[in-house]
Image: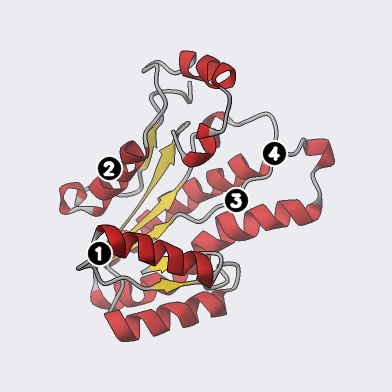
Amino acid sequence: ILTASSQDSADKAVALLKEKHPDSIVAGISPDLSSLSSVREAFRSATEKYGCVDILVNNAGVSESTPFTEYTEETFDKVMDLNVKGVFNATRAASECMIARGNGVILSTSSMVSICGQPSGFAYPASKFAVNGLTVSLARELGPKGIRVNAVAPGITRTDMMKAVPKEVIEPLINQIPLRRLGEPEDIANAFVFLASDEASYITGVVLSVDGMARS
């Protein structure tokens, strides 16, 4: 089950996944992640059709690169509503059937900047630091119920957005990374796959940095 900010985006993601994996069963939904009732209704509808959620990945997020002195309350709330409240709402909704069943995996996307910070757009690292706190606290609370809770903190990754960044901007960034390269999407995906698998059955409450040590 894929979620997106709009049903059109969800449908496009479903079509792309079906193209690569024709035999997969995929559904796309677009709940308002800042509303618990909206998220609960989406999960209720999905679980009625597909059964209880086995693995939840909280990956939705937004960032605003605005200096602190120019940051508005509206911008701050926008970042926190999606990046923090969205994680809470989705986790709250998905965990209900996990608790009843006695097992499940909850994963969230954090960020390198939750550890090292960044000079503008302060709400983004603050929101991801909150995700780290939620991860560790929920791991303690939900562990006795058979649910593992972890997060992945990606560093600078070669995404479509990064492809538009000029070479003269990218090279200094790479030189600051001990492994001397950007992360690839597969690097991040592999971390999620591992933490979701039985190979990580004794790992919970971890914020796994996947950043080539760029956080230093």
**Is label 3 or label 1 in front?**
3
Q: Residues within 10 Å of mark 3 (few under 14, many from 20)?
A: few
Q: Which mark is residue 146?
A: 1
Question: Which is more toward the observer, 168 or 115?
Answer: 168
**Is label 4 or label 1 in front?**
4
Q: CA distance from mark 3 to mark 4?
A: 10 Å
Pointer 1 with pointer 2, Cβ within 8 A: no
Residue 120: x, y in percent? 70, 33
Instruction: Classify residue 187 by image quadrant.
Output: top left
Give the mark, 4 or 1, whose residue is nearer the N terminus. 4
Identify the residue under disc 3: 62
Q: Residue at x 48, y 20 (%)?
A: 216
Give the mark, 2 or 4, whose residue is nearer the N terminus. 4
Q: Is residue 195 above or below residue 147?
A: above
Which amino acid is tagged 4? Ser
Q: Which residue is farthest front? A: 19
Identify the residue under disc 2: 190
Give the mark, 3 or 1, whose residue is nearer the N terminus. 3
Check disc 3 and report its element: helix, strand or loop: loop
131 displayed left or right of 62: left
170 displayed left or right of 69: left
Check disc 4 and report its element: helix, strand or loop: loop
Residue 63 appears in the picture as rendered: yes
Which amino acid is tagged 3? Val
Question: Which is more toward the observer, 191 or 185?
Answer: 185
Identify the residue under disc 4: 65
Q: Residue at x 35, y 43 (%)?
A: 206
Which amino acid is tagged 2? Asn
Q: Residue at x 44, y 48 (%)?
A: 109
